[in-house]
Image: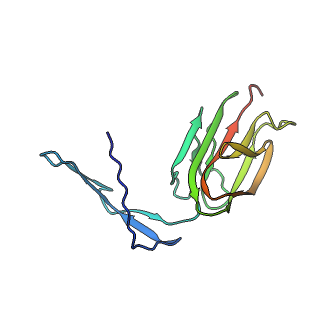
Amino acid sequence: DIDMYTSYFPYINLETGDMIEYKIYAQDNSAAQNSSVFPANGFQTFYITDRISFEENQFSHNWEFTGNQNWFISSDESQHGLYSAESGNIDHNQSSSISIHFTCDETADISFYKKVSCEDGYTDDWDYLKFEIDGTEQDRWDGEVPWSQETYSVSSGSHTLSWVYIKDISV
């Protein structure tokens, strides 16, 4: 079993751009009192941000992956910086999905850049990338779509954003 603990620091006022450094010390309650430290040397660091970026060459938030192949970080191409997220390498009649859950304090816009390169179906139902908010499809793209920005409004409350790449049954 894994016990999860959350710490709350009510007197710390954090703002976007602030850096947090931390080290975790864990000790069990057995007579041996085994202990662990993470990271072993130095401190783990992260920045408070209102943006999700892949520039650390890893998925930094609580992303969920479903489908036949997971999305991954790629340095082959990006809109800004060195890295981007890329759908898993799937075969016919398969899908690759990435989602993130978050809570929005007030109605706001979310924006992302996307690039699509897949089979172009005249009805947009062959191979395509679709974007969903809370399980409702907002848009889909197929064919050759250069880097472009998309913006959607989300209301206050909890939401799930999903990007799903789907390939049809044949070429």
Q: Is residue 92 above or below residue 54?
A: above
- Name the residue at the top extreme: 169
**The C terminus, quarter of image:** top right
At 72% from the left edge and 42% from the top edge, which residue is drawn? Answer: 129
Percent x, y of residue 162: 64, 45
Percent x, y of residue 137: 73, 43
Q: Total marks drawn?
A: 0
**Residue 53, visible in the rendered structure:** no
At 62% from the left edge and 61% from the top edge, which residue is drawn? Answer: 81
Percent x, y of residue 27: 22, 51
Q: Is residue 139 left or right of residue 57?
A: right
At 79% from the left edge and 42% from the top edge, which residue is drawn? Answer: 142
Q: Is residue 3 above or below residue 15?
A: above
Tell me which corner region of the image, top left, top right, bottom left or bottom right, holds residue 21.
bottom left
At 59% from the left edge and 45% from the top edge, which residue is drawn? Answer: 99
Tell me which corner region of the image, top left, top right, bottom left or bottom right, holds residue 135.
top right
- Of the pair 154 and 123, the residue shown nearer to us: 154
